[in-house]
Image: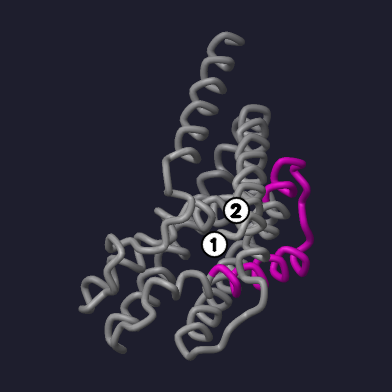
Amino acid sequence: MRDGMRRFHTRTCASCLGFVLIPGAALAHHPMGGSIPDSTWHGLLSGFGHPIIGMQHLFFILSVALLVAVNPRRVGGLVAFGFIVATLFGAILHVLGVGLPLVDSVVAVSLIVAGAALALLRVLGTAALVTVVGISGLFHGHVYAESIIGATATPVVAYLMGFSLMHLLLVLGIAELGRRIYASRPVLTGNALRLTGSLTVLVGIGVGGLVFSGGSA
């Protein structure tokens, strides 16, 4: 049993580290290969893909979903709704030409905060969780909009619908799965949560380091 658990943790670590270290994946902002969506279908696909291929966004969403999983069930819908509204608002602000200060730095901090809370298995209160997710979502949404600047209205609307739906599926789906597994295997799941939180912190530090060196997240 112990050997099996060790093998599981080793494989999980290797897989996650490989995922994080894919060249350029952590900075992917253009799901359509760098081209601006020019149709409803392309906008929708781009919206579906962005939360998945952008590692900084994916790890934040994963951490938020798992934080929801260790909180009371009623919190899940509120957090998911708040996150979707905040990211939408942040993206719309960018499309309208309204800038936010220190966007990349806030994205990095959001990863570190969410990851640390998960790594420590800290159960945040509803107000604190919604506030952190809401503010962070605003800035993540602002970054999302980079991939649709210059697109016409129809692909933009499709893109916003796509990433909103993907957020809803990811947050609620992962939260429900994590809640069920945590109830049946709390020790194993707790270790997996700590690992995910630690990796999220590392991604946040990496994004922060890039920003500090003059790059862009």
Q: Nearest the camera: 97 or 161?
A: 97
- Which SS class for mark 2? helix
Front position in the image: 80 or 48 = 48
Where is mark 2, residue-wise? 210
What's the magenta bit mostly, secondary-structure-wise? Answer: helix
> Considering the numbered disc 1 on the image, is that residue within a helix, a strand or a loop?
loop
What's the magenta region? Answer: 115-140
At 40% from the left edge and 53% from the top edge, which residue is drawn?
53
Kind of residue indicated by mark 1: Ser
Rendered-image quadrant of the C terminus: bottom right
Residue at position x 61%, y 10% from top? Answer: 2
What residue is rendered at 36% in x and 68% in y?
47
Residue 31: where, in percent of width, then height?
33, 61
Q: Residue at x 52, y 58 (%)?
A: 57
Marked residue nearer the N-terminal end (1 or 2) = 2
Asked if marks 1 and 2 touch (Cβ < 8 Å), the reply is: yes
Residue 143 location (% of width, % of height): 51, 70
146 relative to 30, above or below: below
In the foreground, 112 or 119: 112
Mark 2: which amino acid? Answer: Leu
Q: How far apart are labels 1 and 2 at the CA level? A: 7 Å
Tell whether position 122 is magenta. Answer: yes
Q: Residues within 10 Å of mark 2 (few under 14, many from 20)?
A: some
Q: Which residue is mark 1?
A: 216
Q: Position of residue 159 (x, y in %)?
A: 35, 75
